Structures are given as structure tokens and as C-alpha cells.
């Protein structure tokens, strides 16, 4: 299967750091040190995965939880597998 990529650019290093935390990978930096342009890429999320993520976030928000929190409320409530 071929990986599809999406691309973006940023003008400052703080934006590059923030984008990196969101899964973007720095691929190039052009321009002068005073006015650089950073180019980044990340794999395009499959439609099925995106819908699943959006639905998961809606469930978290409906329960008053932060979707960015890695804790799974289902596992917490049910006691986890084998219990």
C-alpha cells in the first residue's frame, strides 16, 4: 500500500515544534536564517481511521473528558480485560 502525504509550511520554530507534536515531520528548511520557511509532511489519515477518531472524541467530550488524554474511560469503567 502506498502512503499518501499531506504537506504544510511554517515560518517560525515554535510552530514547527507544535506541528511536530501533532505528528508532522520536518522535511526541509529554506530561506535565510532571519526569514526561514519550514516544510513539513505527515501521512494522510485514512477515512475510516478519521471517522473512528472523531467518534471517539465525541464520546469523550460527552462524558466531560479530554479527548487528548490517553486514558481509556471504557477500560477504567469496566475494570479492563480479564476482570
Image (cartoon, rainbow, N blue to C red):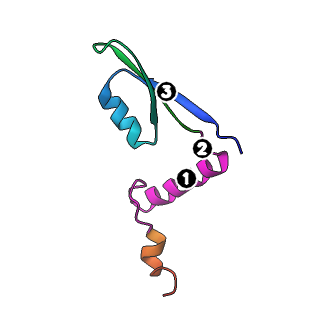
33 relative to 44, above or below: above
* Circle nearer the N terminus (3, 2): 3
Mark in front: 1 vs 2: 2
Alpha carbon distance from label 1 to label 2: 10 Å
Q: Tell me the magenta residue range.
A: 44-72
Circle 3: element type: strand
Q: Which residue is mark 2?
A: 45
How dense is the environment of label 3, judged by Cα within 10 Å: few (below 14), some, or many (20 and up)? few
SS assignment at label 1 = helix
The image shows residue 46, relative to residue 38, as above or below, that is: below
Identify the disc placed on residue 62: none
CA gap between label 3 and label 2 equals 15 Å
Residue 37 place in picture, x, y as percent = 40, 18
Looking at this view, is 47 or 44 the one in front? 44
Name the residue at 38% across, 43% down: 21
- Whichever of labels 3 and 1 marks the residue nearer the N terminus, that label is 3
Magenta span includes 66: yes
Outermost residue, right direction?
1
Task: Say which residue label 1 marks.
Answer: 53
> Residue at 40% across / 65% down in the picture?
71
Amino acid at each position: 500500500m502506498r502512503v499518501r502525504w499531506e504537506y504544510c509550511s511554517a515560518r517560525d520554530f515554535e510552530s514547527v515544534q507544535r506541528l511536530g507534536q501533532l505528528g508532522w515531520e520536518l522535511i526541509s528548511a529554506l530561506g535565510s536564517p532571519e526569514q526561514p520557511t519550514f516544510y513539513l509532511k505527515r501521512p494522510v489519515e485514512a477515512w475510516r481511521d478519521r471517522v473512528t477518531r472523531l467518534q471517539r472524541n465525541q464520546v469523550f467530550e460527552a462524558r466531560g473528558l479530554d479527548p487528548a488524554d490517553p486514558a481509556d474511560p471504557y477500560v477504567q469503567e469496566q475494570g479492563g480485560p480479564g476482570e
